[in-house]
Amino acid sequence: MSTKHKMIITSFTMWGSIGFMRGVQSYNFENVTTLYTDKFFNGILGTFLYINPCTAIFMFYKELYRIEVNIFNIKQEKKSNFYNKLIF
């Protein structure tokens, strides 16, 4: 396997992992109960949304928004629905 293929696979894996993490965080924000199967399936949904080419552009925009909020440490935005939800 060439270096280019390894870099592509690594990029998709990392992007999908971010999607899984965001899905679990979105579930934690919306629900106070800890049902691990629901967290897992919400994480899988996040992975699908981040890797799917049709929705990846929206997820990329949302990640840029989160980076901006974290850089400027906007505490009010960190508590908002748009920041914490997986999709809008």
Image (tube, helix red, strand yellow):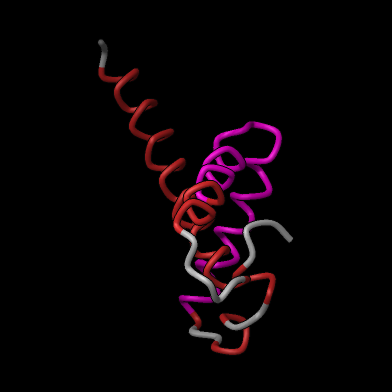
Magenta segment, principal secondary structure? helix
In the rendered structure, the answer to whether residue 58 lies left or right of residue 75 reads right
**Residue situated furthest top in the rendering:** 1
In the rendered structure, the answer to whether residue 51 lies left or right of residue 4 reads right
Magenta segment: 43-71
Residue at figure coordinates x 55%, y 86% from the top left: 74
> Does the magenta run of residues contain 45?
yes
The x and y percentages for residue 61 are 64, 54
Does 38 sit above or below residue 66? Answer: above
The x and y percentages for residue 48 are 57, 37
Does 76 sit above or below residue 82? Answer: below
Residue 5 or residue 45, whichever sits in front: 45
> Does the magenta run of residues contain 51?
yes
Residue at figure coordinates x 64%, y 65% from the top left: 85
Residue 43 or residue 4, whichever sits in front: 43
Quarter of the image where the N terminus is located: top left
Does 35 sit above or below residue 5? Answer: below
Q: Quadrant of residue 2?
A: top left
Quarter of the image where the C terminus is located: bottom right
Q: Count how many numbered circles sit on residues in the image.
A: 0
Residue at figure coordinates x 29%, y 23% from the top left: 6
Does 38 sit above or below residue 77? Answer: above
Residue 45 or residue 70, whichever sits in front: 45
**Residue situated furthest right in the rendering:** 88
Residue at figure coordinates x 55%, y 76% from the top left: 32
The x and y percentages for residue 54 are 70, 34
The x and y percentages for residue 75 are 54, 88
